[in-house]
Amino acid sequence: MNTYKLFLVLLMAGLLFHCSPKTMGGLSKEEYNAWKQKKKELTPENYKALLEQNDSLSEENEHLSEKESYLNQVIERKDNEINRLTSQISKIKEEGPKLNSVSNAPDPWDKGVVFRVQLAAFDDFDLRELTENGSDLKIIDQDGYIKYVLGQFRDYEMADKFKKKLRKIGVNEAWIVPYRDGKRVPLKEVLTEVID
């Protein structure tokens, strides 16, 4: 029994020796001594500044985590919107040939003043496949840009409401572009004709 107790005492002493504060933190003896010296040199003001900086960084980290969570929710909503629009595009592509075969009559929107809302103009991004089969989205190659125009309105106020709705949902560069007899014209040229 005494041998057993002696063995336990020696085992515990060995564990305590090997689990000293110097080795428990994962620091080597040299690192431990260097940090111990730095701790001794630390003034109360420096220690206070370190604690305040730690608190500030913790708050900033929490704020960034909340922002990340919010942005993940935004991304999820946008992904859902993309899926919904992709489904609509597929449906339009399926129904498009039926709509195009119904009428080959001239487009009534090519006569008189028409306001369209231009969504964007890109020189390297092409969405032509989205407008096949009679969509209201028009794609125009002009001046080295691929311009995307959505909607057709005879009334300027209706076009303006549509533009504002597009901006509200995040299409910030939407603006109104007028056409006369199928050709784009400056807004000031036709605005007096349509606004009393």
Image (cartoon, rainbow, N blue to C red):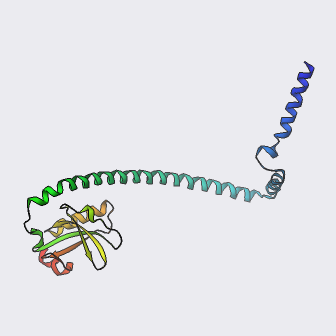
Residue at horizontal 29 percent and vertical 72 percent from the top: 146
Residue farthest along the top direction in this orientation: 1
Locate residue 56 relative to residue 5 in the image: left or right. left
Q: Give the image quarter of residue 150.
A: bottom left
Q: In the rendered view of the protein, which quadrant contains the N terminus?
A: top right
The relative height of residue 120 versus residue 13 in the rendered view (above or below) is below
Tell which of 188 and 11 is nearer to you: 11
* Figure label count: 0
Tell which of 159 and 6 is nearer to you: 6
Residue 196 at least partly seen: no
Residue at horizontal 83 percent and vertical 35 percent from the top: 15
Residue 38 at least partly seen: yes
Q: Give the image quarter of residue 41.
A: bottom right
Q: Where in the figure is residue 13, as x and y percent of width and height?
A: 87, 34
Locate residue 56 relative to residue 4 in the image: left or right. left
Residue at horizontal 22 percent and vertical 73 percent from the top: 177
Locate residue 45 relative to residue 168 in the image: left or right. right
Q: Give the image quarter of residue 187.
A: bottom left
Q: Where in the figure is residue 120, as x and y percent of width and height?
A: 30, 69
Q: Where in the figure is residue 164, as x and y percent of width and height?
A: 26, 64
Q: Where in the figure is residue 182, as x and y percent of width and height?
A: 15, 75
The relative height of residue 15 versus residue 171 in the rendered view (above or below) is above
Tell which of 89 and 78 is nearer to you: 89
